[in-house]
Image (cartoon, grey):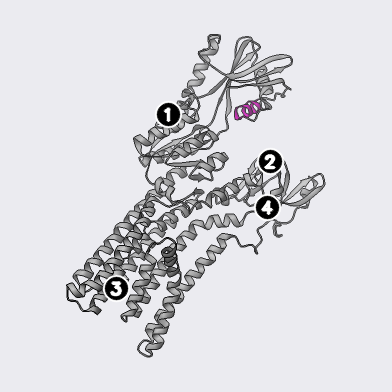
Amino acid sequence: MQAIHRVMPATQKSMNQPDPGRRPRASFLAMLRHKEILMVICSGALMLAAWGIGNWSEPLSVLLYIASYVLGGYLKAKEGLLTLFKDRDLDVNLLMIAAALGAASIGYWNEGAMLIFIFALSGALESFASERSRKDISALIALKPETALRVDGDGMKRVAVEELSIGDLLLVRPGEVIPADGIIRSGGSAVNQATITGESIPVDKGVGDGVYTGTLNGEGALYVEVTSPAEGTLFAKIIALVEQAQNETPETQRFIKRLEGVYAKGVVMVTMGFILLTPILLDWAWSFAFYKAMVFLVVASPCAIVSSVMPAMLSAMSKSARGGVLFKGGAHMDNMGMTKVVAFDKTGTLTAGLPMVTELFAADGYDRLQLLSACAAAESLSEHPLARAIVRKAEEEGLGIQAAEELQALPGWGIEARIDGILWRIGKADENDPSLPESLRQRLQVLVNDGNTVSVIQFGDNYAGLIALQDTVRPQAKAALSRLHKLGVVTVMLTGDRNGTAQSVAREAGIDLVYGDLLPQDKVKYVGELRAKHGHVVMVGDGVNDAPALAAATVGVAMGGAGSGAALEVADVVLMNDNLERVAETIELARRARKIVKQNLIFAAGVITLLIIGNFVQELPLPLGVVGHEGSTLLVILNGLRLLR
């Protein structure tokens, strides 16, 4: 530990900061986005230049228009051709390119260039929304530490993070990224956890506090004991979760995507009908029929409808990520907006998961401190939260922890150990046990009704007392549940704890419905019943036993800070800072996103309908059709981007 006095100053470059020369995949995507925007800007500049010199040199003007078409339409044409040859389907990209080329073929070069420019601009804006939804995660991946400074009997050595093992001691210098999940064994510092929890203010950390991979150490040196291998860190799990985020799209978007191919074929057929049949049936001049067909091809294309969903959902996901709420895909954001019921696990979710001893009740003839000392000795080797609470209580009372012999777990009941040659047992209290003394039975009923988890203490074959423990409700739980109630959401608790304990916590927190004494399969059963009765159900949990219920719910939400690996993997949404108030905030945001999507779809469909009618009833000019159609596309995208604020 002497090396702690020879730490690097905060201004010195950290050895495990990301190498600026390494470009993660997300940076490459960002580069592509900038390239696309640059091409759109150049396309627009060439269009303006061509229009400006049109009266001076028509051939040069046409050449500039062609260059504008190529720069603005290249990426969209490539996407459309890939869809055509790979999926054997038409999409809106080819419709727009065909419309622009058709406009140019009848002399409307400027209108065609404007069509491509605005269409490409709308695509760039949609790419911007997609990039913003990945922005926080890209920064997180860029912060992934490569090496760590391990301290052992041979001194300090820089090693790859993959070589770290549980129990290794690391030195984290000021200004360095923490390379592994662990517990501080020496030192203290303010740690910036924004990449993990979304907290904007650094958190003071000291001996015994946990730290996360990818968070930034402040001005103090820290000695950290590794508690998780590199692939099992919370940081690694977050990256794995987020890489799935674009794989799932909302049902509305999937429906529109399926409809797009059929609709595009219909538009092409009607356009061909305009060109081939109207000169015969309506005696239109071929040039007039072709012009009308090009106007129809422009105004009937579903650009605005296609762009109505994903920019809004991606923007909402980006805003959520900045607040420490990660979605695995837009489909889950869409489903979150239809939430009718939110079901919570109790321990570690509604409660802090840190129980405390509330009472030690001694039977006649037994000393309270003697019972506490025996319980602490028997539980000293267990990592169970209740066992740790008993040991902490003994330490607070100033009792030494005795050595226990013949320690043995009693499955389904508790534990037994021999202390100073005497057999002690601590296990589940049963008020229906006929051998339980009446005084203990009465006290047991009171403690259970008050929400305690109660264990009975046996001295040999005799009942010696009761020890009661209680978990504390999270400070923000009441406010979170109150906000859910204001949204008209029904709140439910699904827990394996006794009904009495569950009812007590539910009363304190403000839960509507309580189901206790549940096994994991029982939770799944009740989630199914709630879905059948109410519709969309969100399940919030943190443990392995919650994983089946998280999978069964419409949307599963895992507690990211304290959640198990199984819960994080199964869940659709992760609360990185374990703040329950984010559940209500996210439901509100998801409802706003769905509202904006509905606005966009109604507006887009209305504009397309009006423009088509205008083309049939009136002589709708092609420039007005271009501005009306592409303007509506830009408006629906910008409407979705409002959610980024």
Q: Given the image, on which type of amino acid does mark 2 rest?
A: Val
Q: Quadrant of the N terminus?
A: top right
**Do we see residue 360 in this rendering?**
no
* Residue sitting farthest toward the right: 154
Residue at 29% x, 68% y is 299
Taking 155 as reference, is 375 above or below it? Answer: above
Quarter where residue 624 is shown = bottom left
Question: Tag 3 or tag 4, which sits nearer the N-term?
Answer: 4
Q: Which mark is residue 219?
A: 4
Which residue is tagged 2?
207
Q: Main secondary structure of the magenta part?
A: helix
Taking 136 as reference, is 430 above or below it? Answer: above
Quarter where residue 8 is shown = bottom right
Q: Given the image, on which type of amino acid does mark 4 rest?
A: Glu
Local packing at callout 2 (Cα closer than 10 Å; few below 14, some 14-19, many 20+) is: some
Magenta-colored stretch includes residue 287: no
Whole-angstrom CA distance, mark 1 to mark 4, is: 47 Å
Front in this rendered view, residue 76 or 644: 76
Whole-angstrom CA distance, mark 3 to mark 2, is: 72 Å
Q: Is residue 299 left or right of residue 410?
A: left
Q: Is the C-beta separation of discs 1 and 4 under 8 Å?
A: no
Whole-angstrom CA distance, mark 1 to mark 2, is: 38 Å
Quarter where residue 503 is shown = top left
Q: Which residues are magenta?
A: 384-393
Q: Given the image, on which type of amino acid does mark 1 rest?
A: Val
Name the secondary structure under disc 2: loop
Image position, residue 26 (x, y; %):
55, 60
Which residue is tagged 3?
294
Query: In front: mark 1 or mark 3?
Result: 3
Local packing at callout 3 (Cα closer than 10 Å; few below 14, some 14-19, many 20+) is: many
Q: Which mark is residue 514?
A: 1
Taking 485 as reference, is 399 above or below it? Answer: above
